[in-house]
Image (spheres, rainbow, N blue to C red):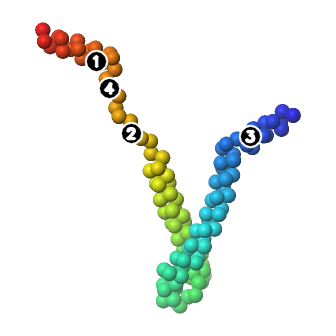
Amino acid sequence: MGIVQEFKEFAFKGNVVDLAVAVIIGGAFGKIITSFVDDVITPLLLNPALEAANLKNISELTWNGVKYGNFLSAIISFLIIAMVLFMLIKAVNKVNKPAVEAPAGPSNEEVLLAEIRDLLKNK
């Protein structure tokens, strides 16, 4: 019975559940970004460049038999994902920024030492 209890503690720990949720959301986010690149960015920005090169699809880009079009698409996807995550983390950090506390006043010892210093100066 001990191994079952240990497994329950491991499986339902906050870190494991949080990681599972992050992986699922990350997968869905990846699909959104892929669709954004394939359905929005490519038609708006890349299609004019592809038409100038007499190509219909970015995957048709080749050079001496090397198909670098898919690689370019992956780079564009990566850059978009990185920018979105950067902006998201920046916004979260701005919201979760701890309030700046006012500096604490001098301690009792510091006040006492200042009084002693002042008394010595006046002598």
| Residue at the extreme top | 123
The residues tagged by marks 1 and 3 sit, at their Cα atoms, a distance apart of 52 Å
Q: Are marks 1 and 3 in contact (CB under 8 Å)?
A: no
Position of residue 45 in the picture relative to residue 6 (left or right): left
Residue under circle 3? 10
Residue under circle 2? 100
Of mark 4 and mark 3, the one earlier in the sequence is 3
Give the answer, above or below, for where 41 lies relative to 115: below
Q: At which x and y percent is residue 76?
A: 53, 71
In this view, the residue in front, 66 or 3, is 3
Q: At which x and y percent is residue 35?
A: 60, 73
| Residue at the extreme left | 123
Q: Which circle marks residue 105 in the picture? A: 4
Give the answer, above or below, for where 113 lies relative to 65: above
Q: Badge 3 local density, few (<14 within 10 Å), some, or many (20+)?
A: few
Q: Are marks 3 and 2 in contact (CB under 8 Å)?
A: no
Q: At which x and y percent is residue 108?
A: 33, 17
Residue under circle 1? 111
Q: Callout 2, which amino acid?
A: Val
- Does residue 68 appear anywhere in the picture? no
Q: Residue at position x 28%, y 18% from top?
A: 111
